[in-house]
Every structure is written in structure tokens, then in C-alpha cells.
Amino acid sequence: MYKAKIPDFGHPLKFRPHGLGPTIKVRSPKRPRDGQSTGGINLSLSRFDQTKVHKLQHEVRAIRDCMEQHPLTHPNGVQFSRITRIFNNASLEHGGRSYGNYQNFSESVRLTMTIDGEPVCEIDIKSCYLAIIAGRLGVRLPDDPYSVFPYVRKREGLDTYKEARSLMKLLVSKLLSVDSEPTSFPRGEKFKAEDGSIKTLTTKQKYHVSNKLSAKNLYAEIYDTYLSCSRSLGQDLA
């Protein structure tokens, strides 16, 4: 809607981050519209428990203060010293993930950044969604929760093994991210074709899923596998 044209001053400009701006945000629930989820607007913090709000704000300010003393630095010299915690569904109990501008860069670029001249690393929680749920239920998962699915197991040792595992991981993520029981594959990825048109690569195309195999079959396999695992471990994962 608006454009700003920056004149060429003949030398690079550097701006010191001031650390201002909201420390936390709470967004409204998303609403379906035309087959897509829309919404998630920022809500006034005055409508929430102020004791909780002030506690969360204090925690984020402490993190910002530390980041200002030890900023994350891009190889080009740009520094990042600010995060914001964002909550969802009009609740201080949903979400709460921290976001910063450095997340606009790809993983490969982020791994070239430094803190106080020292290289950084990214720590990934193995089978994150399943690990969190299992932890809350106090149950034990198989060593690789995605390799136990028959769809993945029968491709062990083949070039398609990682592809099959990635597909089942994607389906588990969708299964745990929607309120209702899913019956379709996750949405595909848009790309620009050689002729400049925008096309969609479906999930079935990306992971080379047979046309005879439906999403319902694979979701059923997920349920059946974990029910079987829970019985063998003497636990209830259902």
C-alpha cells in the first residue's frame, strides 16, 4: 500500500536496535474463509490476566537485555537483539513461541551467524510433536517414532526410505495440528513454472505417492501402529 524510496547517501547506514516494541502478542483464533484459515489479529493485552502478562513481559525483556549485550550477528555485520513471544487462540496458554527477524533467513544462512564471534548451532528436538505429547502423557516412544510405520519400514534400505519417512512425519504433524480427524493430504507447494505461471506441486506428487493410496489409508496406519506400540509397551498412547 505504501512505498518508501531510500536515497543513495554514498555510504552504508547502521542503526542501533532500540529493543522497543511489544514483548508479547496475543492473536485471535483463525477463522475459515473460502476454504482457508484467516484471522489471527493482535488483541489488546488489557483483556488478559495482568499478573501473567507482566510476568511474561518481564521474562522477554530479560532475554532482550541479554541479546543486546550478546547480539546474534550476520556475516554482513547486521545484528539481531530482539525477540517477541506470540500466543495464539486468544490465550496465554496457546503458543508462546519466540520470533525474531533472524528467522527470515534460511537455516544455512543462520548457521553462518555468530554470537560474540563464536559460531552458533541449532538444536532440533527429535520427533518434536510426538515427543511433547509423549512427555505430557508420561509414555515412552520407539527410538524412531516415524520408522515404525509399515509404509516406511518396507522401504528400509531403498532410496525412497527418507522420502517415505518425511511423508509420514508430515502426516503426523497435520494429525496433531487440526481439531478434527484429517482425511486429506496436507496442502501442496506453489512454484513458478518455466512459462512464468504459478502451479502447485501436490503432496502426493512431491513424495511420489501412488494414486491408489489415499490419505485415509495412511492416517489409519498411523493410528493402528501406535495402538499396537502402546499395547506392546503396556501403555495407552490413544
Image (cartoon, rainbow, N blue to C red):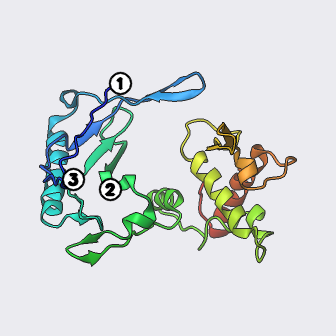
**Residue 162 appears in which quarter of the rendering?**
bottom right
CB of mark 2 within 8 Å of CB of mark 3?
Answer: no
Helix, strand or loop at disc 2? Answer: helix
Q: Which of marks 2 and 3 is in front?
A: 2
Q: Name the residue under label 3.
A: 82
Give the spatial CA distance, label 3 vs label 1. Answer: 26 Å
Query: Counting other residues with Cα less than 10 Å from the Cα at mark 2, is it few (<14), some (14-19), or many (20 or more)?
Result: many
Seen at 57% across and 51% down, the residue is: 173
Helix, strand or loop at disc 3? Answer: loop
Q: Which of marks 3 and 1 is in front?
A: 1
Q: Can I make out residue 238 in this image? A: no
Side (left or right) of 58 relative to 227: left
Q: So how many labels did they put on this image?
A: 3
Give the spatial CA distance, label 2 vs label 3. Answer: 9 Å
**Residue at the top extreme?**
34
* Percent of width and height locating residue 10: 19, 52
| Of residues 61 and 136, the one drawn nearer to the viewer in this rendering | 61
Side (left or right) of 210 relative to 2: right
Side (left or right) of 34 relative to 147: left
Q: In this view, does 153 lie above or below 30?
A: below
**Residue at the right extreme?**
212
Seen at 17% across and 67% down, the residue is: 70
